[in-house]
Every structure is written in C-alpha cells, then in structure tokens.
Amino acid sequence: MKVYLSNYRDHWLSPYTILEKVIFWKEIDYDSTYTKKIVNVLSPISEAVKKVLDVVHPRINYVQVDKYDTWNMDSTLANIILPMLIQLKATKHGVPSAFAETGGEVWKLQQSFEFYETNEELQDKAMAEWDAVLDKMIFSFEHIVDKSDWEKEFCSGEFDSNIELGEPGWTGTYVCDYAAMEKVHEQIQEGLELFGKYYRNLWD
C-alpha cells in the first residue's frame, strides 16, 4: 500500500489582501465606494488565479492498494487508524454534536459560541465523555494491531506431543483462560461499533 495525502491547499487570494499590499502606505476605508469598485475589478483576477493554481498545484490524494493489503485488511487498516485516533484525541478542539446532550436541553437550545465558552463545566463533561469513547476505540485498534501479544497474557505452559507414545493429540502444561480472553474480544467489538457510530465525527 502507498498513501500520499498532502495538507489541504487554499489558493484563494482575497482582493482586499491585494489592495492592502499595493496601497501599503495608508489605511484603507473598506466601506468607501472607491474601495468597493477596486475590489469588484480585482475579484475576477483572484478567481482566475485560484482556478489556475488549483489545476497546477492540486492537493495530493493518491492511494495505491496492493493485493497483499487485503489478505488481512482489518489488520492493515488498524495500523493506519490507530495512530490517527491517538493524534485526534490529543489535538481535538471540540466534541460531536451528539454530546450536547451532556449539557441538557438548555445547551441544545443555546448553542452559541459565547454560551459554550461560559459553561466550562458542561464543556469539560462533554469532552470527558468524548475522550472515554475515543479511549474505547483506541483500545480496540491497539488490540487488533497487537493481537498475538495480548492473547499470550491469558495463556501459559507448553504443548507436549505424545504421538511417539501412541497417544494422539496434544498434552502438556498449556492452559488458557478463554473466558477472560472473550471479555477482551467483547471490549474490542464495543470499540469497533463506537468507531462505526461516530465515524463521521472523527474530525479535529
């Protein structure tokens, strides 16, 4: 697999920015008729420059999938998703709108920026709930990536072949707590279901 994704590119150059650079020696009156006339002249130029740069310098969005990537597709994707979830949790600036329920009906009805900022207790509570959901997702993908390692924690001993003694099968000191292992699998499934539920909310 080869993935090349560049940062988002914005080639828009505002007419006002051009005007500020050209007439740098004085303050611009943005409400004046003269300024508006110049902006109307510059706007088509800005649009044309943007279209040219969008074609010449587009965002890189290249993905090549090889046959071996789908042999264990769940494991392949987990190696990509896990570090992204960890980074999202560390750098996020908000919570999904569904978590507005944390603040009750008042928060739902008053979703202005000012209200949100002045109710830090509700904001912190919603953030903590979203963190808990992200932690469950991260738990799932960590265990998918390291499946062979975490399953060993529930097993001990060794197999001993007694075929030479005429006793078919395997014997020895090997034991495994399959019940405890199944609980972890249930936790993994819970995190995967949350990942699907909040997939469209995975933004920063």
Image (tube, helix red, strand yellow):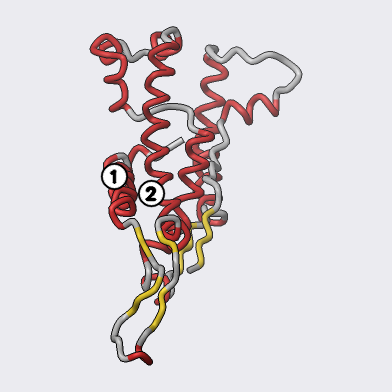
- Residue 161: tell me if it is visible: yes
Reply above or below: 31 against 16.
above
Identify the mark at residue 140; answer none if there is no mark: 2
Rate crowding at label 2 as few (under 14), some (14 to 19) or many (20 or more) other CA atoms within 10 Å: many
Residue found farthest to the front: 165
Q: Residue at x 47, y 56 (%)?
A: 80
Q: Quadrant of residue 134?
A: top left
Q: Quadrant of residue 199?
A: top left
Residue corresponding to mark 1: 190
Of residues 204 and 186, the one drawn nearer to the viewer in this rendering: 186
The location of residue 30, given as percent across then percent down, is 56, 15
Among numbered discs 2 and 1, the one appearing first in the sequence: 2
- Which kind of residue does numbered mark 1 sit on? Glu
Residue found farthest to the left: 105
The location of residue 24, given as percent across then percent down, is 73, 22
User: In the image, 141: left or right of 104?
Assistant: right
Reply above or below: 81 against 127.
below
- Element type at marker 2? helix
- Element type at marker 1? helix
Of residues 31 and 17, the one drawn nearer to the viewer in this rendering: 17
User: In the image, 7: left or right of 146?
Assistant: right
Q: Residue at x 56, y 17 (%)?
A: 34
The location of residue 57, given as percent across then percent down, is 57, 54
Of residues 174 and 24, the one drawn nearer to the viewer in this rendering: 174
Q: Are marks 2 and 1 in contact (CB under 8 Å)?
A: yes
Of residues 103 and 151, the one drawn nearer to the viewer in this rendering: 151
Q: Residue at x 41, y 51 (%)?
A: 141
- Residue 78: tell me if it is visible: no
User: In the image, 8: left or right of 76?
Assistant: right
**Gap in angstroms between the C-alphas marked 2 and 1:** 8 Å
- Which kind of residue does numbered mark 2 sit on? Ser
Identify the mark at residue 32; answer none if there is no mark: none
